[in-house]
Image: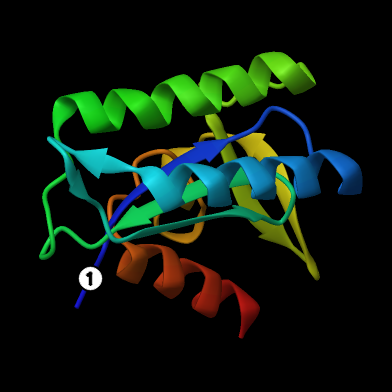
Amino acid sequence: MDLRTWVFVANRKLTDVETAQVENALQDFVATWSSHGIPLKASAFCFEQASIVVAADELVAKASGCSIDKITHLVRALGQQFNVDFFDRFNVLIRESDEWVISTYNSAYQSVSIHSGILSMEEFRNITYIKNS
């Protein structure tokens, strides 16, 4: 089974306090997220204090345009709250030594970077696994 995934890479790393607040907001969001009144089976988390990852099991219910807009609204609000830009699609995470760092998109790194074009948890896991090995 794979999950439809949305990735929002920040323009800076979040602090520990900001990460905890973002995690709490994400958990509250997925607990009540629905599509046309049908609850979505979803999860969300911060990855490496530098991105927000939201995933939904669309075998249970498909995320509609309105439900996807709710993700965007939440992430935009979190960005405003913490003065972080999660919507610059040129921001990517690449692995340097033992750390994920925010960098600028380069097509040479697309298959090994965390970026907004990732559409599935399988793809996300493969990138994080390859770079952690």
Q: Which is nearer the eye, 77 or 86?
A: 77
Q: Is residue 5 left or right of residue 79?
A: left
How many numbered discs sit on the rendered protein?
Answer: 1
Q: Is residue 128 above or below residue 67?
A: below
Q: Which residue type does callout 1 highlight?
A: Asp
Q: Quadrant of the N terminus?
A: bottom left
Name the residue that disc number 1 marks: 2
User: How many residues crowd around disc 1 within 10 Å: few (fewer than 14), some, or many (20 or more)?
Assistant: some
Report x, y in % for residue 74.
Answer: 50, 26
Which residue shows up at 77% across the image and 22% down it?
Answer: 82
Q: Which is nearer the eye, 85 or 73?
A: 73
Q: Quadrant of the C terminus?
A: bottom right
Which residue shows up at 44% across the image and 52% down it?
Answer: 31
Does any portion of residue 110 appear in the rendered image?
Answer: no
Q: Is residue 27 left or right of residue 107?
A: right
Which residue shows up at 54% across the image and 46% down it?
Answer: 28
Does any portion of residue 42 appear in the rendered image?
Answer: yes
Report x, y in % for residue 70.
Answer: 36, 26
Query: What secondary structure is found at the residue carrying circle 1?
Result: loop
Which residue shows up at 59% across the image and 18% down it?
Answer: 77
Q: Is residue 67 above or below residue 34?
A: above
Q: Is residue 116 left or right of residue 114?
A: left
Q: Is residue 5 above or below residue 122?
A: above
Extreme-bottom residue of the structure: 133
Q: How has the structure been colored for display?
A: rainbow
Q: Which is nearer the eye, 82 or 50?
A: 82
Report x, y in % for residue 107.
Answer: 41, 41
Report x, y in % for residue 65.
Answer: 16, 26
